[in-house]
Amino acid sequence: MKPIKVGLLGIGTVGSGTFNVLKRNQEEITRRAGRSIQITMVADLNTERARELTNGECEVVNDANLVVNHPDIDIVIELIGGYGIARDLVMKAIANGKHVVTANKALLATHGNEIFKAAQEKGVMVAFEAAVAGGIPIIKALREGLTANRIQWLAGIINGTTNFILSEMRDKGLDFDVVLKEAQRLGYAEADPTFDIEGVDAAHKATIMSAIAFGIPVQFDKAHVEGITKLQATDIRYAEQLGYRIKLLGIAKRTPQGIELRVHPTLIPAKRLIANVEGAMNAVLVHGDAVGATLYYGKGAGSEPTASAVIADLVDITRLATADPEHRVPHLAFQPDSMNDTPILPMSEVTTSYYLRMQVADQPGVLADITRILADSTISIDAMLQKEPEEGEPRADIIILTHQTQEKNVVAAIAKIEALSTVVGQVTKIRLEQLS
Amino acid sequence: MKPIKVGLLGIGTVGSGTFNVLKRNQEEITRRAGRSIQITMVADLNTERARELTNGECEVVNDANLVVNHPDIDIVIELIGGYGIARDLVMKAIANGKHVVTANKALLATHGNEIFKAAQEKGVMVAFEAAVAGGIPIIKALREGLTANRIQWLAGIINGTTNFILSEMRDKGLDFDVVLKEAQRLGYAEADPTFDIEGVDAAHKATIMSAIAFGIPVQFDKAHVEGITKLQATDIRYAEQLGYRIKLLGIAKRTPQGIELRVHPTLIPAKRLIANVEGAMNAVLVHGDAVGATLYYGKGAGSEPTASAVIADLVDITRLATADPEHRVPHLAFQPDSMNDTPILPMSEVTTSYYLRMQVADQPGVLADITRILADSTISIDAMLQKEPEEGEPRADIIILTHQTQEKNVVAAIAKIEALSTVVGQVTKIRLEQLS
């Protein structure tokens, strides 16, 4: 059979990984796909480097339009990133009747609805396994492996940079700023780490997973996004003493009132398997009504792990290209005419548990005031830890773990607690999930 | 679009789960699949119970032939089990041009080649996600999610009964027989638990995974099968002291000499995520050259978890039914004309590490004799633990962890060690894998 011809846009870390793996494992991949898959064109602004990386084995151009417009190209791989040029090129490729593979979570989380609609109308596929959790086939698991289930919730460690930082903060008892610098030195964090440490990258990925899990459009603008920059080593230590680990989780949950879509630091029981996912590794826990809990673990970034997902998409498209478009796997798991408009809840209406830490004057009656405020807000206490003040220190730390309650209740209660004259400064609030 | 009509053979635990989940989640499943999937016929010897379970919502017959021969049935689900009748019915269904979904690992591990060949010739699909690790979509991950990779090895906790027993033996320090009885009482082990505790069930599943991972035919007869019946609480305790857990693993590994396919109790480092998979849960660790290590975790058995996999297959078939048969996902991941004949190695040629425990007389020179024998067999020692004998006890336990070596070397060295007059009784040998 004729080889499938692929055009690659952007030959950076993932692009060169894709080129190399496809070449190294060509024989096995062909035996699986039933056809040879060949990258025949590469577009990159740095044509010299691109020629070097591809060894003169394919045509190198500096204008990506030449690839998306080329009549011989069957599949375009978009690895440029960002929302601007990448979006134009993906839309042009679709308009030209080409299938697209992309690792661009930012693009899909913000413009996915438009892109999938165009692809649907044109009868082409847009595949994006590499956009979420790198080499872990989580899109496939959610979209095909768990189709029997009403998915109830998912929670993922889906940003390796922040998980590396959190693991180091915990292991070494260091503060965020110190560990961030180390992560940058080691290449685990970028020079501008904003998207990672502020939770934006994780929110892009959680947004994509929420759409697939619940059959709703991608709605990144509705996601609650909170990073790890304010997290203190103190809280990691207290969490540990209470039997919890702190992880940056991307959470999507179905509730009778609507869908929760949120990224924030989260206390989770240390005994859960996902709590033991360390360093730059990723893992996603998915809970379906029939299957119960399933977990998917692996490398969430890097050249060849991400290339693994890109190439799996190439093979899928190669296999499915002849399927009647209506019988292919829908982009967002549900048929386009069967999407839901279930609303995404504002953060104030989200229900979860909380870790609260406050500094109080070491004098009688303080605890009574605090617990009274919580009781009045119908917030019940699950556990409490009061640290004796150090010798000569007039203040004590109180840590409270609450049972489930609505975010707005906690916010209101915190305002009242902070207004107490015996409470010093602000109350630290970190959400807590049992994941059971 | 016309509903897909499904005939169910056997409505026991998994069958009733499949019926119930398909009914409960009908709306979501239809929105995913693009067509309604309906069980319209059920065959079971106990027609009365079958009628009760299905609420008169579908035709109940006691002769499965009526289902596989019925012109209206598109897909047959085989949940009878065993090799005899099940095989005949699956072959008849295929001959009648029906797609088949089965959870029958015993059947596929022993007759899979013949079944897949017949399906290929007839242009129908035989799907079997439920045959390995219950609700975990591991077949899909191996066959579709990791197609970019040269898979190097996989190792799985793929039998819930034995993992439950091992977890209990470790937690409570109890011996195998005691825990088995408890497992039977709790329903985690069957009245005749032979297939589980002797490793046969795990070997069926490992055989199926080895075929998909390496593109070889299923060859259950070549698998090394060893269960947990001889495992002693003592060894679990010593392993713990050395930083290891003992799990029954199904292992498939590619080596330059051939493929290793083996099921046996295995020491694995306690810090590995898979070492912390407890109770009846399953997990499979897969190592690919591009993606590195990935792990898949979930319930490996039970009514609805297994039904989750059965229904995912129904949806896949519904979606792929219109695909040109040559472009569907091949049954064993590789195109039928591209299978390998790489040999499966006999156990004597397998390379792994070992835990050796021996009882020795508490007198000088014993250790020198033992380490000399190992050195002469070019077996190098990774760690050693010598337990001081109890007061008045003339014998001491010596535990040795070896580096990697061939099984036949170890077997020969053990024979020599056992021949020493200072060594009492037999040497206990348990294999050890770093899984790194």
Image (tube, coloured by chain):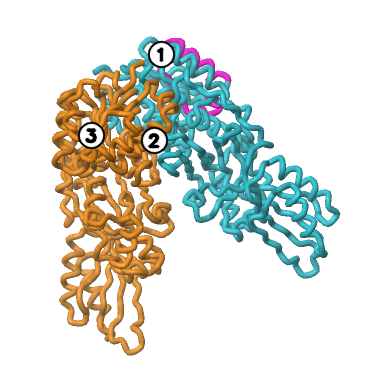
Chain colours: A cyan, B orange
Q: Is label 3 or label 1 in front?
A: 3
Is residue B292 positioned above or below B95 on the image?
A: below
Tell me where residue B163 appears, x and y as whole percent.
Answer: 34, 56
Main SS, magenta residues: helix
For label 2, the residue is B21
Q: Residue at x 13, y 41 (%)?
A: B84
Q: Which structural element holds mark 3?
A: strand
Q: Chain of mark 3?
A: B
Q: Are marks 2 and 3 in contact (CB under 8 Å)?
A: no
Q: Quadrant of residue A34?
A: top left
The amino acid type of the residue labelled 1 equals: Gly
Q: Is residue B116 magenta?
A: no
Q: Are marks 2 and 1 on the same chain?
A: no
Give the numbered dot on residue B43: 3
Give whichever of A120, B386 is nearer the camera.
A120
Q: Is residue A61 visible in the rendered structure shown here?
A: yes
- Quadrant holding the N terminus of chain B: top left
Q: Answer few, some or many: residues within 10 Å of disc 1's Cα (few below 14, many 20 plus, some between 14 and 19).
A: some
Relative to residue A261, is residue A303 drawn left or right?
Answer: left
Relative to residue B46, is residue B384 drawn left or right?
Answer: right
Give whichever of B90, A330 is nearer the camera.
B90
The amino acid type of the residue labelled 3 equals: Ala
The amino acid type of the residue labelled 2 equals: Val
Q: Are marks 2 and 3 on the same chain?
A: yes
Q: Residue at x 34, y 46 (%)?
A: B301
For label 1, the residue is A123
Spatial CA distance of label 2 from label 3 is 18 Å
Spatial CA distance of label 2 from label 1 is 32 Å
Spatial CA distance of label 3 from label 1 is 40 Å
